[in-house]
Image (tube, rainbow, N blue to C red):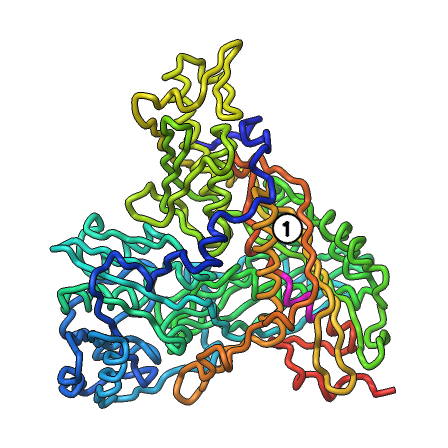
């Protein structure tokens, strides 16, 4: 199905099942422990266990690698290094090699795997490896590296700053201006389920059970690395215990499980221990951002500039922190630029809302600072500079843009009018209290997605697609889509996901999964409806599917009758035309936060949080709300505590576990409220839906920072907002 004109009225608009806040189908399986995660599959008979040997240096090589004691250790079946593996291919989506040697690209890069009868034997044997390294000088300091960093495009290739109008002249002439620098640190995905895989060979055919967000990408990359045909790889990931973008790409666990299984001649399990989660895999890169805003006295922005620098391994890409600044606010004269430094730290790559998440942590503080300079309310200043068109291409309108409504309705619900415009003046006992706001923005991305839908004689419907569920509710919204299209109750639909044997979907990531995967199911259901109508002798154009029946004119038939002689199947994919180029497809929101800062200790406690989201049709408000409050919680972590600390001498993340890499817990999070505005975007897809899971994160960190400023009068531009950065600046005790 080609989607190249705005969606008209269609079966989804009935909203009998779609749009309902139903419980997640996979909920009982996960709460009872019967959902099977990557390391738990039992189809692989008598598996052995692999333990990864990681490099103890960040850059250089090893002169020799002595594994004699490893091979002689109890229970050891096989040992695989780069020498045993032979030449490996390079996947499309990894910057660093997933099996290093003798050259080393970063700390904890895998340099081998030990396969043994038990996990304990593999771990003990791996500790016996003897390596003599030749350490080389590496670059681990972002500030120093940015001194010579080049301007690049989003893809990391050399480029020039993007300029609209005459930014320098307009900024210089502005009567009110801001020029400030903001920093965000390296972040870890810190998902609960580790990177884990089970691999088994049957002749030259490989089956891998793994924890991966994008089945087809992962299958293709793994085949390239192993130098085998893609059709020889079976890739399975039905349940994923969190990914946040870290599992978009194949990691060392899958490659080493496959190599270990080949060497051992039996199934092999490999899971990366927590320190490897931080240093062996990917992370969100740190940024240093400069924001300049110039405005007239009435608050109209005349110049806005955003420059960001980040680092990655050679051949990597920048953290695209300036993306939202191109679209979020009006302003005739604009400048954005990305700089990319070469760092010898573990690979930087996508993490939930890459670009916008750290970019808005800076931009939305800057907007508050500018509002204060102008003597304007922060909400009013944002509304003043709203735009319904792409500022760089005014002929290109937003398909839907309700930012103003998000801000105004949020302000009313949150009682923003109680905010004291003078910071550091409001107290509740020993607590300094304050309110903060930030806009939310994330682009909607369209992607081809396919599905296959079956109808059986009992009227039951089954859906197959390689879409994944990373805890986001994919099983449920896909079932809701099929139920709505086929006119059956939700419990009449079975959904199968996460197998390379199914049609290729868009996968989970980038906030693109829900809207595009359900659109693919929609397309497949259209095909099945046509087959059913034809089988029953109905006109497909006028046939109604409802209540388990098909009706046309004065005739009706039970749905299952169409499959009385055998299962009927519809298969198709959603493909997109030029609507996404004609219209700007984006999602919008507003975050409101109230904090209390202890006047004596400086400890910050959140009191209330509110998110207002405009993100197209919400397919399941219950699971969507869960996505937003989870994202808000992640935003609190980014604001107040999360930071991968770099040892700039030896080039690794020191706090590489969940004891010292702090993330929010229940006691850190207050009441969270979420409002979804009514919206159906007919330019997006037949579902008229867009993504929402990353919108809930974008802007949260700045809203927290702005609330702390309102409470204390201390402006902090360097995340995380730990009390050492403001304790000595708090208002005098009274």
| 245 to 709, vertically: above or below | above
Q: Which residues are magenta?
A: 699-706
Question: Which residue ends up furthest to the top in the rendered image?
Answer: 554
- What type of secondary structure mainly makes up the magenta span? helix
Q: Is residue 433 left or right of residue 651?
A: right
Nearer-the-camera pick, 268 or 345: 268
Q: In percent of the image, x 48 and y 47: which residue is there?
A: 25
Percent x, y of residue 461: 41, 33
Residue 595 to residue 656: above or below: above
Q: Quadrant of the C terminus?
A: bottom right
Q: Is residue 331 visible?
A: no
Q: Is residue 156 magenta?
A: no
> Who is closer to the viewer here, 257 or 9?
257
**In which quadrant is the N terminus drawn?**
top left
Would you place residue 496 above or below residue 292 in this image?
Answer: above
Q: Residue furthest left?
A: 203
**Quadrant in which residue 267 is drawn:** bottom left
Residue at (28%, 83%) from the top-left corner? 60
Query: Residue under circle 1?
Result: 588
Residue 247: image x %, image y %?
40, 61
User: Horizontally, is 153 left or right of 427 in the view?
Assistant: left
Q: Is residue 228 left or right of residue 439?
A: left
Residue 277: % across, % down: 40, 73
Q: Residue at x 47, y 44 (%)?
A: 446
Asked if residue 96 can be seen in this view, the reply is yes
- Residues 47 and 127: in front is 47
The residue that appears at 45% across and 77% down in the rendered structure is: 148
Classify residue 199 by image quadrant: bottom left
């Amino acid at each position: 199905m080609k989607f190249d004109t705005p969606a008209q009225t269609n079966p989804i608009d009935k909203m009998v099942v779609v749009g309902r806040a139903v419980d997640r189908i996979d909920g009982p399986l996960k709460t009872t422990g019967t959902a099977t995660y990557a390391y738990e599959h039992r189809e692989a008979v008598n598996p052995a266990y692999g333990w990864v040997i990681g490099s103890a240096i960040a850059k250089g090589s090893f002169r020799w690698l002595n594994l004699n004691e490893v091979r002689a250790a109890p229970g050891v079946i096989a040992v695989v290094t780069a020498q045993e593996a032979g030449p490996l291919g390079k996947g499309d989506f990894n910057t660093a090699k997933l099996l290093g040697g003798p050259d080393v690209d970063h700390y904890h890069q895998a340099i081998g795997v030990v396969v043994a009868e038990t996990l304990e034997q593999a771990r003990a044997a791996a500790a016996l490896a003897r390596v003599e390294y030749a350490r080389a000088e590496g670059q681990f300091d972002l500030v120093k590296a940015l001194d010579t960093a080049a301007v690049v495009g989003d893809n990391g290739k050399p480029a020039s700053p993007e300029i609209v109008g005459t930014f320098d002249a307009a900024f210089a002439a502005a009567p009110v201006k801001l020029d400030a620098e903001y920093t965000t640190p390296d972040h870890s995905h810190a998902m609960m389920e580790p990177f884990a895989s089970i691999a088994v060979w049957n002749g030259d055919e490989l089956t891998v059970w793994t924890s991966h967000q994008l089945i087809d990408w992962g299958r293709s990359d793994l085949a390239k690395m192993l130098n085998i045909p893609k059709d020889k790889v079976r890739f399975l990931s039905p349940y994923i215990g969190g990914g946040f973008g870290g599992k978009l790409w194949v990691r060392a666990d899958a490659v080493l499980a496959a190599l270990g299984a080949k060497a051992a001649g039996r199934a092999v399990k490999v899971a990366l221990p927590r320190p490897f989660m931080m240093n062996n895999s990917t992370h969100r890169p740190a940024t240093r951002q400069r924001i300049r805003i110039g405005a007239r006295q009435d608050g109209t922005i005349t110049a806005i500039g955003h420059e960001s620098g980040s680092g990655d391994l050679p051949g990597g890409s920048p953290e695209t922190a300036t993306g939202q600044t191109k679209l979020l606010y009006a302003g005739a004269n604009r400048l954005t630029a990305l700089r990319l430094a070469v760092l010898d730290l573990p690979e930087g790559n996508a993490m939930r809302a890459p670009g916008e998440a750290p970019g808005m942590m800076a931009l939305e503080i800057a907007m508050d600072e500018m509002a204060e300079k102008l003597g304007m309310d922060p909400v009013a200043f944002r509304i003043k500079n709203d735009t319904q068109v792409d500022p760089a291409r005014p002929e290109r309108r937003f398909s839907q843009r309700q930012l103003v409504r998000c801000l105004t309705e949020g302000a009313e619900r949150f009682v923003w009018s109680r905010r004291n415009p003078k910071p550091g003046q409001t107290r509740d006992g020993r607590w300094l209290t304050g309110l903060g706001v930030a806009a939310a923005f994330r682009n909607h991305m369209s992607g081809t997605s396919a599905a296959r839908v079956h109808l059986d004689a009992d009227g039951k419907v089954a859906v197959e697609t390689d879409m994944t569920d990373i805890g986001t509710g994919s099983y449920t919204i896909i079932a809701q889509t099929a139920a709505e299209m086929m006119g059956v109750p939700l419990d009449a639909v079975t959904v199968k996901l996460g197998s390379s044997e199914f049609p290729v979907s868009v996968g989970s990531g980038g906030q693109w999964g829900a809207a595009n995967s359900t659109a693919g199911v929609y397309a497949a259901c259209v095909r099945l409806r046509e087959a059913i109508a034809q089988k029953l002798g109905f006109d497909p154009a006028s046939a109604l599917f409802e209540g388990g029946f098909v009706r046309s004119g004065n005739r009706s038939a039970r749905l299952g009758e169409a499959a009385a002689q055998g299962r009927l199947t519809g298969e198709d994919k959603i493909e997109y035309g030029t609507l996404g180029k004609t219209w700007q497809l984006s999602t919008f929101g507003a975050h409101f936060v109230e904090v209390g800062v202890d006047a004596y200790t400086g400890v910050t406690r959140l009191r209330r949080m509110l998110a207002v989201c405009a993100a197209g049709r919400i397919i399941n408000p219950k699971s969507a709300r869960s996505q937003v409050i989870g994202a808000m919680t992640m935003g609190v972590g980014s604001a107040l505590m999360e930071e991968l600390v770099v040892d700039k001498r030896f080039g690794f993340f020191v706090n590489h576990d969940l004891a010292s890499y702090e993330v929010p817990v229940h006691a850190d999070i207050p009441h969270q409220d979420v409002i979804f505005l009514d919206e159906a975007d007919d330019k997006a897809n037949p579902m008229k839906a867009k993504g929402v899971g990353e919108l809930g994160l974008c802007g949260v960190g700045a809203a927290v920072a702005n609330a702390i400023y309102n409470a204390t009068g201390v402006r902090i531009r360097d995340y995380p907002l730990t009390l050492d950065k403001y304790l000595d600046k708090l208002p005098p005790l009274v």
